[in-house]
Amino acid sequence: MAKAYWVATYRSVSDPEALAGYAKLAGPAIQAAGGRFLARGTAAKAYEAGLLQRTVIIEFDSVAKAEAAHDSPGYQEALRVLGKGADRDMRIVEGV
């Protein structure tokens, strides 16, 4: 079974306090679901049409586990706390 990766990029953060509240809840919820943070922070370098924006990459053992983490009550509470505090793009990608 192929691993899966959450890839989240932040276009902007309008409410740093909401983002901090989200992070306080999201990290433990993701780790409890088996997620392993591989990278998080502002991009070191951007090429082509890339942007120097905050990026987070999290590894899971499968797409099903990544989806379950996203849909878990703990992570959904983190999203509720974030609200509209950040404009971001998140996807799950299957590993090769």
Image: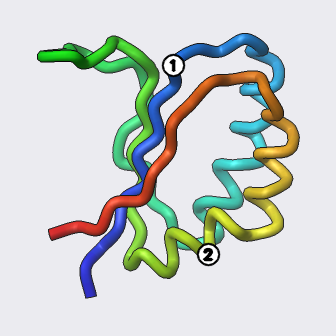
Identify the secondary structure beneath mark 2: helix
Tell me the number on the disc at residue 11: 1
Q: Amino acid at mark 2?
A: Ala
Tell me the number on the disc at residue 68: 2
Percent coordinates x, y for residue 20 in the rendering:
75, 27
The reply, left or right, for residue 64 in relation to residue 1 is right
51 versus 33 height, above or below: above
The reply, left or right, for residue 4 in relation to residue 47 is right
Identify the secondary structure beneath mark 1: strand
**In the rendered view of the protein, which quadrant contains the C terminus?**
bottom left
User: What residue lies at 61% left-to-right and 75% top-to-bottom?
Assistant: 68
Please identify the residue farthest to the front as the structure is shown: 49
Q: Amino acid at mark 1?
A: Arg
Percent coordinates x, y for residue 72 in the rendering:
74, 70
Disc 1 or 2, which lies upstream in sequence?
A: 1
Q: Are marks 1 and 2 in contact (CB under 8 Å)?
A: no
Viewer-nearest residue: 92 or 54 = 92
User: What residue lies at 33% left-to-right and 60% top-to-bottom?
Assistant: 93
Please identify the residue farthest to the bottom as the structure is shown: 1
User: What residue lies at 34% left-to-right and 12% top-to-bottom?
Assistant: 52
The reply, left or right, for residue 85 in relation to residue 57 is right
Colour treatment of the image:
rainbow
User: What residue lies at 62% left-to-right and 24% top-to-bottom?
Assistant: 87
The reply, left or right, for residue 88 in relation to residue 43 is right
**What is the crowding at mark 2: few (fewer than 14 residues within 10 Å), some, or many (at least 20)?**
some
- Tell me the CA gap for discs 1 and 2: 25 Å
